[in-house]
Image (cartoon, helix red, strand yellow):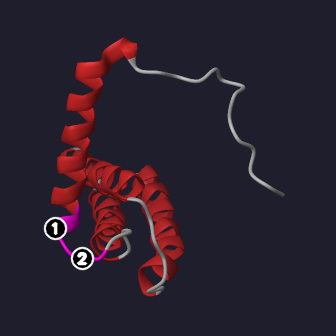
């Protein structure tokens, strides 16, 4: 048993603890652009840890991926819930990539300093 396995497990337990309030808050709205990649990375980490024989780390990462999945399913902006949010995210991502490819470098962009500042 490697001590690193428990360190990664501890980090995952902390992540799960910090994500729990978001899952429980019905008014929370987390963009799919944050939750879907985090869910995917947690799943990949879980698989990777499992292949390294780090069982506790793998379980912790799958737990984190599960929390992000719940957030993506039930705390995303919009009226629909569940796995349809993932399909919506992938569809929007595909549309944005098509639009980017068609406009490419011709897209209008503002200079870096030309943006609105939020009010304090």
Q: Is residue 7 above or below residue 85?
A: above
**In the image: residue 46, left or right of residue 106:** left
Callout 2: helix, strand or loop?
loop
Magenta span: predominant SS is: loop
Asked if the residue at tag 2 contacts the one at tag 1, i.e. Cβ–Cβ closer than 8 Å, the answer is yes
Residue 84: numbered disc: 1
Q: Which residues are magenta?
A: 79-85
Residue 81: numbered disc: 2
- Pick the residue in front: 113 or 86: 113
Quadrant in the picture for the C terminus: bottom right
**In the image: residue 12, left or right of residue 72:** right
- Pick the residue in front: 105 or 60: 105
Residue 31, given in percent of the width and then of the height, sits at 41, 60
- Pick the residue in front: 30 or 58: 30
**In the image: residue 111, left or right of residue 2:** right
- Pick the residue in front: 3 or 39: 39
Circle 2 Cα neighbour tier, 10 Å, few/some/many (<14 / 14–19 / ≥20): some
Quadrant in the picture for the N terminus: bottom left
Residue 115, given in percent of the width and then of the height, sits at 68, 35
Q: Is residue 23 above or below residue 120?
A: below
Residue 94, given in percent of the width and then of the height, sits at 19, 39
Residue 76, given in percent of the width and then of the height, sits at 36, 69
**In the image: residue 86, left or right of residue 7:** left
Circle 1 Cα neighbour tier, 10 Å, few/some/many (<14 / 14–19 / ≥20): few
- Residue at 31% of width from left, 77% of height from top? 74
- Residue at 24% of width from left, 75% of height from top? 80
Spatial CA distance of label 1 from label 2 is: 6 Å
- Residue at 32% of width from left, 54% of height from top? 42
Q: Is residue 101 above or below residue 24?
A: above
Q: Is residue 118 above or below residue 9?
A: above
């Amino acid at each position: 048993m490697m001590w690193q396995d428990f360190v990664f497990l501890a980090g995952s337990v902390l992540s799960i603890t910090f994500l729990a309030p978001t899952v429980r808050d019905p008014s929370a709205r987390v963009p799919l652009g944050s939750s879907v990649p985090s869910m995917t990375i947690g799943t990949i980490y879980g698989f990777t840890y499992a292949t390294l024989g780090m069982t506790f780390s793998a379980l912790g990462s799958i737990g984190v991926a599960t929390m992000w999945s719940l957030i993506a399913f039930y705390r995303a902006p919009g009226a629909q819930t569940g796995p349809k949010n993932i399909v919506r995210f992938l569809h929007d991502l595909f549309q944005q990539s098509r639009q980017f490819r068609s406009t490419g470098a011709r897209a209008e962009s503002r200079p870096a300093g030309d943006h609105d500042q939020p009010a304090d």
